[in-house]
Image: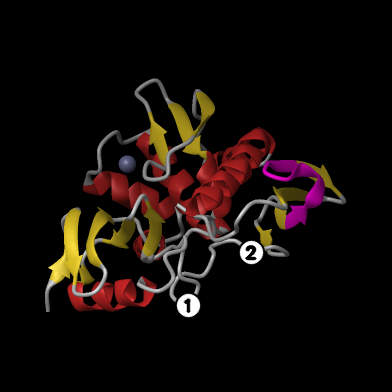
Amino acid sequence: MEAIVNSGMYRHDRVGLFKVTVRSNARRVIGRYKEGLWHITVPYGIERHKLMSIVGTWEQTRDTVDETTCQPFYRIGQQIELDYFTVVIEREDKIADKVISRYEDGKYHVAIGSRIDMNNPALWKTITRAIEDIAQALAPETLIEEARAIAKKVGVRPTGWTIGRGRRVLGTCNARGIITLSRVLMFMPADLRRYVISHELAHLSELNHSSRFHTLCDSYLDGREKELQVKLKSFRWPLYY
Ligand SMILES: [Zn+2]
């Protein structure tokens, strides 16, 4: 069983040469045909024969994405319900090739112009960015307030709070006692937010990850540190990354 771990040019019997980009955070195989060549993004370690059979099905289509293997990540009419806000994805004829978001009837509406192809991964990124911008704007009065309440409950007081943008670095605590929380915490369930917040709060007392640190963090989490650590590892974002 051969696994694909390197980006580069690969050859398919019928399709010929195609270009592969390996991404560790890719969740599916995505292909775009441009200038006579398939450009394909694959998850790290995908089996070669599996990739070849997917590429084989694209031979005839030569379009942006094969819908039988790659469903669009977002779809028209989809409602994404997060703890602090709800997003609705919808079509908007008047804006042709633009994407706009607006707040109406208690929800954030991400409107996709009528000329935009929902199968295009570049559009999914645009939608993700629009939703991240909403989270950024709401974070001070939602995420930070939640974190303040958790800090109060465990009896610690950071010097200050800021909002970050990291998707891998979800939180940091600096030597001055300022905690940064990523806005992407707002796309997680409450227990995982609490896990990240508690971790940073424990750094106010213990700067490294010593056993004293974990004992403290675990006490902030009522003995759930290990369980939540495992849950975080298998968490899947509701947004396209
Ligand atoms: Zn840490």
Q: Which mark is residue 156?
A: none
Residue at the (60%, 59%) spot, across then down? 118
Q: Which residue is mark 2?
A: 75
- Where are the magenta residues, as a range? 90-101
Q: Is mark 1 within 8 Å of ligand 1?
A: no
Look at the image and tell me in which quarter the N terminus lies: bottom left
Mark 1–mark 2 Cα distance, whole angstroms, equals 15 Å
Rendered image coloring scheme? secondary structure
* Residue 60 visible in this rendered orientation of the protein: yes
Q: Is residue 102 left or right of residue 62?
A: right
Horizontal and vertical percent position of residue 225: 38, 58
**Magenta run includes residue 100:** yes
Q: Residue at x 87, y 51 (%)?
A: 105
Q: Quadrant of residue 166?
A: top left
Q: Which residue is mark 1?
A: 68
Q: Residue furthest left?
A: 2
Amino acid type, label 2: Arg
- Kindly identify the residue that appears in the image at 37 percent across and 26 percent down: 174
Q: Is residue 217 left or right of residue 116?
A: left
Query: In terms of secondary structure, where does tag 1 sit?
Result: loop
In the rendered structure, the answer to whether residue 170 lies left or right of residue 12 reads right
* Residue at the image point whose x is 31% and y is 76% from the top: 56
**Front-most of residues 10 and 217:** 10
Please, which residue is most extreme toward the right here?
A: 105
Residue density around tag 1, few if under 14, some if 14–19, many if 20 or more, within 10 Å: few
Q: Was residue 53 drawn as part of the magenta stretch in this picture?
A: no
Say whether residue 135 is left or right of residue 51.
right
Amino acid type assigned to the residue bearing label 1 in the image: Thr
